[in-house]
Image: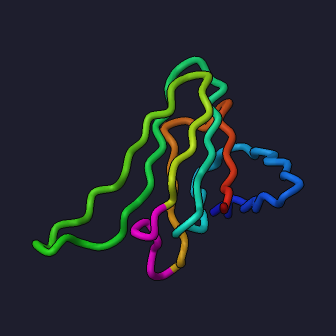
Amino acid sequence: MADIPVRRPTVDGVNLALGAAAAGDTAECGPGFALLVSNGGGSSVDVTIAVPGTTLYGVATPDKPISVPAGELWEIPLLEVYRDPATRRAAISWSATTSVTRIVVRR
């Protein structure tokens, strides 16, 4: 498991220093947190954020998939609903990690 570091901008700014995406990534989540994903590859990459729990009908809550196109930088809100009650973090998976970098920011 890889805990994605959090950068908090100050009035002077901050170096985001995106790191390589990895299997088993986890991140802090909740109000003000966002995942920045840069896809330097030649095709889109699917980012999936696990959504723990079940619906009122007892069915597993569906995970949140996001497709990041090739060559783009995306900001994805890390909502409170993604927080795993056991780890207190969001679990993030990738369809590919080659040429994909990420960082978490908190505003």
Q: Which color scheme is applied?
A: rainbow
Determine the residue positioned at 61% across, 38% down. 97
Number of on-image labels: 0
Percent x, y for residue 38?
A: 64, 35
Residue 61 figure quarter:
bottom left
Determine the residue positioned at 65% across, 32% down. 98
- Horizontally, residue 35 falls left or right of residue 44, namely right
In the figure, 101 relative to 62: above or below? above
Percent x, y for residue 66?
A: 42, 41
Closest to the observer: 10 or 46?
A: 10
In the figure, 15 relative to 29: above or below? above
Q: Is residue 20 located in the magenta-colored stretch of the structure?
A: no
Furthest residue in direction left, as rendered: 57
Percent x, y for residue 33?
A: 59, 62
Span of residues in magenta: 79-86
Determine the residue positioned at 69% across, 40% down. 101
- Horizontally, residue 74 falls left or right of residue 14, namely left
